Image (tube, rainbow, N blue to C red):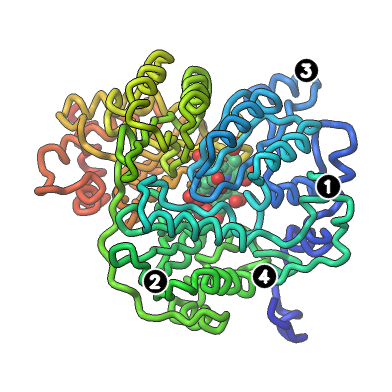
Amino acid sequence: MPPQDAFTQAVAPALSGVEHLKARSRLLRGRLAEELAEGGSQVSEDGYNLLKFHGSYEQHDRDTATALKQRGLEKDFSFMVRVRMPGGRLTAAQYLALDELADRHGNATLRITTRQGIQFHGVVKDDLKPTIAAINETLLTTMAACGDVARNVMCSPTPIRDGVRARLDADAARLSAALLPQSRAYHQIFLGDEAADGSDESEPLYGATYLPRKFKIALTIPEDNTVDVLTNDLGLIAIFEGERLVGYNVAVGGGLGMTHNKAGTYPRLASLVGSVGPDDLLAVARAVIGVHRDHGNRADRKRARLKYVVDDMGVEWVRAEIGRQGAPLSPLLPMGEFAVPDLLGWHAQGDGRFWLGVPVAAGRITGPVRRALREAVARFGADPVMTPQQDVLLTNLAAADRAPVEALLRAHGVDLAEALTPFARWALACPALPTCGLALTEAERVQGPIVASIEAVLRRLGLAEERISLRITGCPNGCARSYAGDIGLVGRVPGAYALYLGGDFAGTRLSFKLFERVRQADLAATLAPILADFAAGRQEGEEFGAFCTRRGPAALAELVSAAARSG
Ligand code: SRM
Ligand code: SF4
């Protein structure tokens, strides 16, 4: 934190409770070790907030909460545990270990996250330490997977074996390692390192109160914006000439979370502010983190993300401040347009081996899909990569393995990419109910029926092969990046969604809200006249999001009203 004089201290708004907690936590320790050793199924509020920094959230099963309360019983508490794994990469052995852990301590599912992580749900309090210790034994960590720090670093998942991807992978791993907190609290609390008592520790980058809020980084190349780079606090776009890295274009201040009816909270795409050279990656990441650390709002957590600093202080100021923080920016490097490749199905890696992209509905690896993936990874040694589209790529497969891998997946009844319409392939949904404490509506559990109802309209209109992205979230926080796709459904009240349209497939334009509340049962009928107008009146090569933006909200709303009047 910058030094504060008496005047700024007197007029500065009160720090939020979480700021006080971090300050007195002895670098993320608090009473967590004691609380985890005590009985019961929950942790205290302080414990809840500190646990996030170690990669876990206390949750309860919202399906059973009311019935349990009526019977005078405690809610069904458990913990979500999130694995930090830059670029979504796992070895076959790591995947199998995580899969086994899902049975031993979780709810027998693995959940691929929209940031290429893996989550366990349903871990009871007594199992939290053994779960985290077991994850560490696989050489993965949950440290800083959540909390007011730099989270899992996203990276282009495309497993092409060339110098470009090798450099990106190495950069993502380097960034992730360099930005971990230095506190050994995690080792003391979860890994039994008694010597790590904090007496000789400091946090040179974050400081004792860490960041005002979460901080997200994605690294990619323009040809692969599957990571939605501009929705991150810091987007790094590597520019190559052939396989020679020229430098990184730097985008700051992306973020999607907002609160219904809270003015001054909104989604924002990151602003491109300049570039740095090939050796300045860590310096620029530390500098942008420094801007957030020193200037982010520590009084109101709903306005604490870096995006609000960028808007409140202005892009020019932020650019200069990044320089003052140690990473002077050069002008932007020329770059091509963003594109989003389709990674599902079979692809050559470029080294004589192949990957198979397997669709996983809403990222939930469960039932037959889970059994099939486990068997394919165990028998063929495929190293899995988690994608930002919540799918899994089975990589490093030999040509001779292609037919047996496919046969194995089919034998388990897994739908391969070609069995799905583009609409189903590109749909995302956040977990929402029953685990997410913030969910206002369902998301993951209604993805299937919502996709099916809109698919029927697309088929009728001859649009079944059209690439249109659908993103469903159970609240306005935007965990499935609902404001950055063609169609966004944002949970409003139980059974009803705000409808957003007009984002683009490449991730360069946010959508606009067309309707405040549409009942789930009415979604397909509401979209039908708009899709019909698109089918009839689109311009050459125009995508659905671009069409919606060109027509504008008033004209689209009128189409829906006219259809209602006539029908
Ligand atoms: Fe998220 C909070 C799940 C990606 C914005 N998010 C949550 C919590 C932890 C709920 C809570 O605070 O109690 C959710 C846990 C649900 C559960 O049962 O598991 C949750 N977020 C997820 C995941 C699992 C969704 C998914 O479908 O995969 C994603 C985990 C990513 C990871 O591996 O780290 C996830 N969350 C995102 C994204 C997308 C992204 O980063 O690419 C966003 C929008 C981008 C952004 O950060 O603005 C996102 N999550 C939020 C927010 C809003 C933050 C804000 O600035 O207002 C919250 C609420 C909060 O932080 O207070 C939130
Ligand atoms: Fe929960 Fe809302 Fe995020 Fe969905 S978008 S996981 S409901 S916080």
Picture quarter with ligand 2: top right
Cβ–Cβ below 8 Å for labels 1 and 2? no
Dot 2 corresponds to which residue? 247
SS for callout 2:
strand
Closer to the chain start, of discs 4 and 2, is: 4
Mark 3 or 1, which is nearer the eye? Answer: 1
* Amino acid under disc 3: Arg
Closer to the chain start, of discs 3 and 1, is: 1
Asked where in the image residue 559 lies, by quadrant, the reply is top left
Q: CA distance from mark 4 to mark 3?
A: 49 Å
Cβ–Cβ below 8 Å for labels 4 and 2? no
Dot 3 corresponds to which residue? 71
Closer to the chain start, of discs 4 and 3, is: 3
Residue placed most toward the observer, 100 or 468: 100
Cβ–Cβ below 8 Å for labels 4 and 3? no
Dot 4 corresponds to which residue? 205
Dot 1 corresponds to which residue? 32
Residue 188, percent from left and from top: 83, 50
Residue 12, percent from left and from top: 70, 76
Residue 251, percent from left and from top: 42, 67
Closer to the chain start, of discs 1 and 4, is: 1
* Amino acid under disc 2: Gly
Closer to the chain start, of discs 1 and 2, is: 1
